[in-house]
């Protein structure tokens, strides 16, 4: 048996409220070209592991507890928006995060835990973001152009901040209605 897992930083109620306000503002101005991420699924992914072998689960949970319980809480600045892969053919709408030294160190520690158990480290550099929407496959050129114009005006308008005080290890269970995220472990920082 295996588990489809990822590690993430959860968002505060204030940040989620700011995201909801930003989303409402965009929804009022845009044609319906985005599928919005459900509020209870908003998070900052540190590492998507994929399939984790069952015999690795408890040892990894133990190592995460030992490692991350020593981490100090730290502030996180959220600023701006962007799209993956690019504005001409956007697939993902995201909110940006200032990559502080504390966040980058946390990502390195996280990668090293999984690497020690034989999981391949991410080759791409870490780009901190919150996925807030996915573009629908079927949209007109005019809809895309309207989004591009609005994006140029709105891309720096989102700002929020919070203190990061824990890391969460999630299982992602795929269903026809979309993924369900189940908490496997939560490590509180000090």
Image: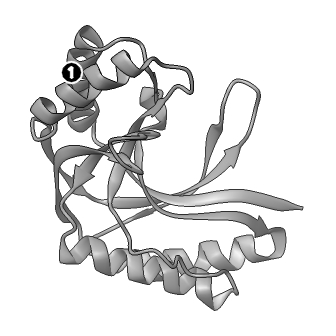
Q: Which residue is mark 1?
A: 21
Query: What residue do we see at 27% from left, 45% from top?
Result: 82
| Residue 111 x/y as whole percent | 50, 80
Which colouring convention does the figure follow? one colour
Q: Nearer the viewer, residue 111 or 186?
A: 111
Residue that protrudes farthest toward the bottom in the picture: 116
| Residue 8 x/y as whole percent | 45, 57
> Badge 1: how crowded within 10 Å, few (<14), some, or many (20+)?
few
Q: Nearer the viewer, residue 162 or 104?
A: 104
Query: What residue do we see at 42% from left, 28% from top?
Result: 39
Q: Is residue 71 visible?
A: no
Q: Is residue 170 left or right of residue 38?
A: right
Q: Is residue 59 left or right of residue 134?
A: right
Numbered disc total: 1
Q: Nearer the viewer, residue 35 or 88?
A: 88
| Residue 105 x/y as whole percent | 31, 81
Q: Quadrant of residue 190?
A: bottom left
The vertical placement of 107 against 51, above or below, is: below
Q: Is residue 120 visible?
A: yes
Q: Where is the N terminus found, in terms of image quarters? A: bottom right
| Residue 178 x/y as whole percent | 66, 30
Q: Quadrant of residue 166?
A: bottom left
Residue that protrudes farthest toward the front in the picture: 141
The vertical placement of 90 against 62, above or below, is: above
Query: What residue do we see at 63% from left, 44% from top?
Result: 182
Q: Is residue 35 left or right of residue 160?
A: right
Q: Quadrant of residue 163?
A: bottom left
Query: What residue do we see at 42% from left, 83% from top?
Result: 109
Dot 1 falls on a residue whose secondary structure is helix
């Amino acid at each position: 048996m295996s588990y489809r897992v990822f590690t993430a930083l959860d968002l505060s109620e204030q940040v989620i409220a700011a995201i909801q306000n930003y989303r409402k503002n965009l929804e009022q101005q845009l044609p319906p070209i985005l599928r919005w991420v459900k509020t209870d699924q908003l998070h900052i992914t540190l590492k998507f592991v994929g399939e984790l072998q069952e015999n690795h689960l408890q040892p990894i949970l133990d190592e995460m507890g030992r490692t991350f319980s020593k981490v100090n809480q730290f502030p996180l600045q959220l600023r701006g928006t962007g799209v993956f892969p690019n504005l001409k053919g956007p697939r993902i709408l995201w909110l940006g995060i200032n990559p502080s030294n504390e966040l980058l160190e946390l990502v390195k520690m996280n990668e090293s835990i999984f690497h020690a158990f034989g999981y391949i480290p991410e080759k791409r550099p870490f780009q901190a973001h919150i996925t807030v929407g996915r573009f629908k496959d079927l949209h007109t050129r005019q809809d895309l152009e309207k989004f591009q114009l609005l994006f140029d005006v709105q891309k720096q308008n989102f700002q929020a901040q919070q203190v990061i005080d824990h890391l969460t290890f999630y299982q992602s269970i795929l269903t026809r209605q979309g993924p369900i995220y189940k908490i496997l472990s939560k490590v509180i920082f000090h």
